[in-house]
Amino acid sequence: MTEPVPAYRPMGGPITSQLQRQGKYSAKVDYLAGLNPEQREAVLATDGPLLVLAGAGTGKTRVLITRIAHILLESRAQPWEILAVTFTNKAAREMKVRIDSFVKPLPELQWMGTFHSMSAKILRKHAELVDLKSTFTILDTDDQIRLIKQLLAAENIDEKRWPARQFAGMLDAWKNRGLQPKDVPAADSSYYANGKGGRLYHDYQARLKALNAADFGDLLLECIRLFRENPDVLAEYHRKFKYMLVDEYQDSNTAQYLWLRLLAQGKPAAEANICVVGDDDQSIYGWRGAEVDNILRFETDFPGAKVIKLERNYRSTANILKAASTLIAFNEGRLGKTLFTDVADGGDLVSFTQVYDSEEEARTIGEEIEQFQRQGEPLNSMAILVRASFQMREFEERFITLGLNYRVVGGPRFYERKEIRDALAYLRLVAQPADDLAFERIVNVPKRGIGDSTVKMLMETARGMKVPLLAATRMLVETEELKPKQRTTLRALIAQFDDWAWRSESLKPYQLVENILEESGYTDMLEAEKSVESQGRKENLKELSRSMEEFDTLGGFLEHIALVMDRDSADASDAVTIMTLHSAKGLEYDTVFLPGWEDGTFPSQRSMDESGRAGLEEERRLGYVGITRGRKRVRISAAQNRRIHGLWQSAIPSRFIDELPPDAVEVTDKGSAYGGYSYGGGAASRFNKADPFESVYETPGWKRARANQESRKGGGPLTIEGELVARSVDLGGESSGYKLGERVFHLKFGYGEVIQIEGNKLTIDFEKAGTKKVLESFIRKG
DNA sequence: ACAAGCACTTAGTCC
DNA sequence: AAGTGCTTGT
């Protein structure tokens, strides 16, 4: 394994220019120096399949980058012949930047990016082979939901009983598993809306084609279909990609796995130049369909694959590593890596603090941050990592009062704001006249007097003539069918769009959007509002236009926003970072705060309810990810009281606290003075057998999950049975389960008497609350 | 066509 | 506590 190290190539001089002329690269530094033997081996083993199991902070990214640099410097491949897939755009961007410090000239790695963006790129080239045009729109979750709602309405499916979100979730799961409509198992497809699930999927796909659109899942799925149905296209990419690298392989789902395998098939499995890097202990996307099994079976898929483990941690102190290792050891079925460090000094103990409520938590952390700041620590070296984004607000509010500079990563998203989405809808419709979802969104924004009935007429015409809404409108305004007022309005709107489309050829995207906002009356609408909010909206739109300046084409910009939903990445100011544990993966900070370690919040109750033990283990890995982000200091806290859905709930510290090693953790309890739950034995309390939550698997959530699983095993598709029962309860209509004059009880309004029945809606004269119209499902017999 | 008011829901993590 | 979507009133 000690292969000879290539000689250091000096920079500058005639050699470099000669290399450059040949399209070759030279090293800026001795890039192999400083790598440990395992890392070096992982860099040099360029040919044949390679699995790198890299624990947190073991220099995984460095290995990937050095490996790419090595391939380029050895002239084994050109930049465009290297496919490097990451899971986040952040990771891709970071790698591009870091490669700059190794190699010159800066190679243009056009095939480095997320699975989704690489797939989109391939799909645009061959769109017509999967019934799309190369200008297809990428739908986000919001568009997806609206589309599903339309389908549900068309099928007369009650959206109350069968929420669109639920179907979106199922669609997502199918697509993550690489299933086309025809592949969906019968049990799955019969689950939703009394067996309409499968057909809805089919209809949904048909609608996407009509809209010339693809959702996130399609980007991969349609790419897979493209490869399968067009061997010649696939062969083209086999020839193209000489080396493939995959980061965070433990997070790949089945569709991504299939996608990769198709691309790797250009050579016999044992000769495929594919390198995957991952850490089973950091698998935190199971809910998104990630299959840890992918990493476990790599050696089977690629026989003779070399496996290299990276276990030497360069990031954290011994105490932090000990805390993380002890916690993760509670999981079963690991590949079993053990992180170690050479540094003798253990460093600061990991701290655990209990506070009274989330407000005090924000206050305490704010004070600590200010203290570190006074000691000369830059704010950039500190981060607060939360389980769920609703926890962020409290910190933001506190930091605003303190005047503490902070930055939120992946919080309330810029591109999901209403005004931004409106502006984007205008742009989408200009770029893509078949984008009916965009048309519907803006046809009456700002208000033009185009109401539901007019829109309905447009939609009927569009459906009848099988053309997009914009085209249907274009025709309708030439007839007598519309009322004069609407006809004039729509005719003007069409003319505007034609004009914008024309101008989009010559104007830069940011100029176009400014014109559109001005001419559509959107800016005037905000002016007229005069509210504090509308001021902020105008600011956001300016920000949008600014962020568009770097784009030369409208299509390029729209692609960017669909796939790259992160914002102000270029903010250079010194600020504390607030983000979720999920988006923190791959990052590191000197000081890391981990608030909200309360049972139910973290580990999340829903995760445990839905996925039982597997869910709990994924939460534990999330904890492991959180702790291992810290270089010098990790400060965990838990609130005794937290407000959830506007109600105060008391909470006990996370069970994970009990799984931390007592000798690496220091416990300070700020909350006990207020009474309430008093935390007993510090990190050592896991030895206290009297603790009712001592066993992880006896908590209410776990019991519930287990009960669910039992019933599932019980036989037959649980879902059909469950549904049939539910339906027989209220076949609704006139045969409501209630009679006029009957005494009933409502959770919120108390007792009352039924005075009118319309289907599942009952009018009830409540004793205290007066007469209300209430859904049947919210009352019970009194 | 649109605004206001009300009942009911919602807050899990991301490309 | 804040947001959605439905119903009612203008």
Image: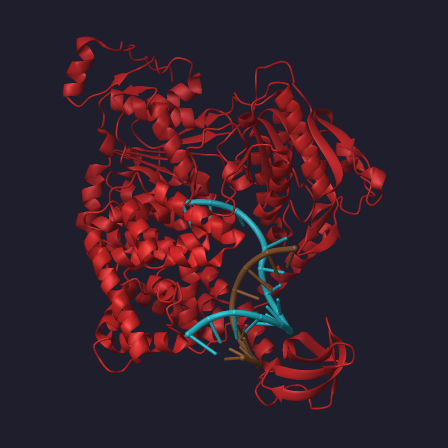
Chain colours: A red, B cyan, C brown
Residue A395 position, x and y percent, is: 62, 40
Which residue is at the front of the view, A11 or A401?
A401
Image mark count: 0
Which residue is at the front of the view, A668 or A480?
A480
Residue sitting at x 41%, y 34%: A91
For the C terminus of chain A, the quadrant is bottom right
Left or right: A722 in relation to A656: left
Residue A216, compared with residue A764, is above or below; it is above
Left or right: A310 in relation to A505: right
Can residue A90 be seen in this snapshot? yes
For the N terminus of chain A, the quadrant is top left
Residue A594 position, x and y percent, is: 63, 36
Residue A206, compared with residue A432, is above or below; it is below
Residue A147 position, x and y percent, is: 39, 66
Residue A620 position, x and y percent, is: 61, 40
Left or right: A643 in relation to A276: right
Residue sitting at x 24%, y 56%: A500
Residue sitting at x 20%, y 8%: A13
Which residue is at the front of the view, A571 or A335?
A571
Q: Quarter-wise, where is residue A721 in the image?
A: bottom right
Q: Quarter-wise, where is residue A746 in the image?
A: bottom right
Left or right: A538 in relation to A574: left
Residue A387, compared with residue B9, is above or below; it is above
Residue sitting at x 14%, y 21%: A22
Can residue A261 be seen in this snapshot? no
Which residue is at the front of the view, A335 or A530?
A530
